[in-house]
Image (cartoon, helix red, strand yellow):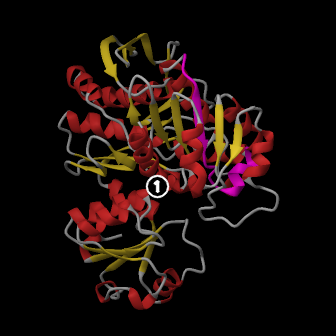
Amino acid sequence: MNLKHINSVYFIGIGGIGMSALARYFVAKDLKIGGYDKTKTNITDALEALGVSIHFEDNIDLIDSAFLNPENTLIVFTPAIPKYHSELNYFKANDFQVMKRSMVLGEITKQTFCLAVAGTHGKTTTTSILGHLLNSCNVEVTAFLGGISENYNSNLILNGTDVTVVEADEFDRSFLTLSPDMACITSMDADHLDIYGDATELIKSFEAFSEKIKPNGKLFVKNGLSIKGITYGIEDNSDYSVQNIKIINGSYVFDVKTPNALLENFKFSLPGRHNLSNALIALAMSVEYGLPTPQLAKGLASYKGVKRRFTYQIKTEEFVFIDDYAHHPEEINAVHQAVREMYPNKTVLAVFQPHLFSRTKDFADEFARSLSYFDEVLLLDIYPARELPIDGVTSKWLLGKINNKHKKLVQKSELINEIKQSTAQVLLTIGAGDIGEEVIHIKQALSVAS
């Protein structure tokens, strides 16, 4: 891809979190940007406010003429776009340069020092911590985030082009387009089995990713994973390990044991051991990059999180409302651990929207077990995303597997009323579908009620 000849970039699926970060990047490069998405959202609104032209109907006639010259236009699409999409097929048939998002990201990072974060869980939080730490240390960094950073109110940190920080996404084997100088693998739990078929094939793809690291590069792996690298863990014998953990005023205070020293007195405000692990690997990569400990400590203490990753919506002595993107059983377990650690004596109501029929089918028993740990459960219908229904795979079927006396299947229209009927002191909304769009309405209703 030669960007010197590109004047305009058209995104098919521009409202996706990864796509919109790329769009913002090219806006900053003063290119003409436009695109299609099927749904108008806060993300598309924000892009339009930057001057990006977006339409919401798959219609070739709606494409701005600025994007109809194959000589100077790049077309970027996401694998979530169906093969029958008329705009995508038009560009392919008319000799445009058409690339997957991951391929474009790979091309952008080739000319930089690239730090990549891989794993089935924790990518977005880890990437945003790492990007924030580098930015706090005045590194000339561009960080592409898979969520909206609370520190920057954006999914792009743009402070120069010497270094890039990216999520290495295992979906559709996208991360194999990257060649990072430094990378980490946070987890390799079975997921995306609609792509891989089984967990063995998923692990093979992570092994292939580990081989993509540049010569003399460094790979960090969560202690216990089967791939060799610099290890990290919590209160164990890893190369990098969190030690002497305390909780002070709702924040973690801890030390980090490195291969060469003990770095003392870090503060981190995101709840949950999974987030503490994310902070550790971001610190480890920053230390290996050569950044000074005092600035890293200040950067970590100032980190605010990512929207929809254990995001507090209401936080009072009497009632807490937390929203989280968790959409895999292990992620739900991590959220449960964090809630019980922070609020050990309070009743917890979990509202969960399953994401994808295939994932629900593949992990039904695991989802049921994870949800059974909460005091109360409200279950929404499955969010289909890119999929068609699978016979017999419904939220009602999943509900029957949950071992919880206080469980109920509800429609979105009933949700706020059902929440109000509960006496739980902690409310969780969980899921990767459009449940996030309901959060503001729930918050407003509960704020008025209180």
Q: Which residue shows up at 50% across the image and 80% down it?
A: 88
Residue 70 appears in the picture as rendered:
yes
Q: Is residue 370 magenta?
A: no
Decide if residue 66 is on the left or right side of residue 379. Answer: left
> Where is mark 1, residue-wise?
437
Range of the magenta residues? 345-363
Decide if residue 392 is on the left or right side of residue 106. Answer: right
Q: Which residue shows up at 53% across the image and 13% down it?
A: 236
Q: Amino acid at mark 1?
A: Glu
Decide if residue 10 is on the left or right side of residue 406. Answer: left
Of 215 and 263, which appears nearest the observer? 263
In which quadrant of the rendered image does the N terminus lie?
A: bottom left
* Relative to 232, residue 310 above or below: below
Name the spot of residue 395 as percent of width and height, x first: 72, 51
Q: Is residue 355 magenta?
A: yes
Of 180 and 155, which appears nearest the observer? 155
* Relative to 413, residue 307 above or below: above
Q: Quadrant of residue 65?
A: bottom left
Q: Residue furthest top?
A: 244
Q: Residues within 10 Å of mark 1 (few under 14, many from 20)?
A: few
